Image (cartoon, grey):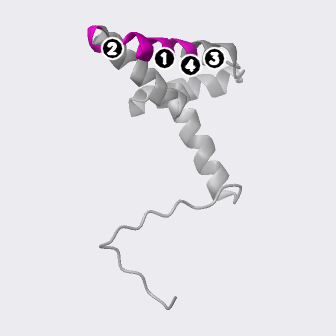
Amino acid sequence: MSRHQFVRELESTADHISDASRADLQVLLRRAALLLRNVGGLSLDPNTDEVLNGLAAEMGKPKPELLEKIVGEWLVSNAYLPVPRQLDEESTVEGNA
């Protein structure tokens, strides 16, 4: 689970805290503590940071989510990560297997 998904889960649980069990809250709090303990900051050049803030606002995304997307796409385009394949049953594929 990504950090962003976990944050959304925490926010959702906070909105419906009366529905959460003690065990679920305990798990969420332990995961939050672990994430906070392992947080590492990213120091950016002020000009780069300004551009990223503007782009994130323009796209309506949090800056960390935007950075995650940019870095992920860069890794794929430079062959450090495999190209994600998203074929469904309706997709046609040419060639022989």
Q: Is residue 54 visible?
A: no
Residue at left 58%, top 42%?
Answer: 70
Secondary structure beneath dot 4 equals helix
Secondary structure beneath dot 3 equals helix
Whichever of callouts 1 and 2 sits on the residue coming sooner in the sequence is 2
Could you tell me the amino acid type at mark 3? Leu
The label number, if any, that marks residue 20 in the structure image: 2
Q: Position of residue 61 (x, y in %)?
A: 43, 29
Kindly check if marks 4 and 3 are in contact, taking CB atoms under 8 A apart as contact. Answer: yes
Relative placement, left or right, of 84 versus 58 is right
Name the residue that disc number 4 marks. 31
Is 54 above or below relative to 14?
Answer: below
Q: Which residues are magenta?
A: 18-30
Q: Position of residue 67 (x, y in %)?
A: 58, 34
Residue at left 71%, top 23%?
Answer: 45
Kindly check if marks 4 and 2 are in contact, taking CB atoms under 8 A apart as contact. Answer: no
Name the residue that disc number 3 marks. 34
Separation of marks 1 and 2 at Cα, in angstroms: 10 Å
Classify 10 Å Cα crowding around label 3: few (below 14), some (14-19), many (20 and above): few
Classify 10 Å Cα crowding around label 1: few (below 14), some (14-19), many (20 and above): some
Relative placement, left or right, of 21 versus 86 is left
Kindly check if marks 4 and 1 are in contact, taking CB atoms under 8 A apart as contact. Answer: yes
Could you tell me the amino acid type at mark 4? Arg
The label number, if any, that marks residue 49 in the structure image: none
Classify 10 Å Cα crowding around label 2: few (below 14), some (14-19), many (20 and above): few
43 or 31: nearer the viewer: 31
Q: Is residue 43 visible?
A: yes
Separation of marks 4 and 3 at Cα, in angstroms: 5 Å
Name the residue that disc number 1 marks. 28
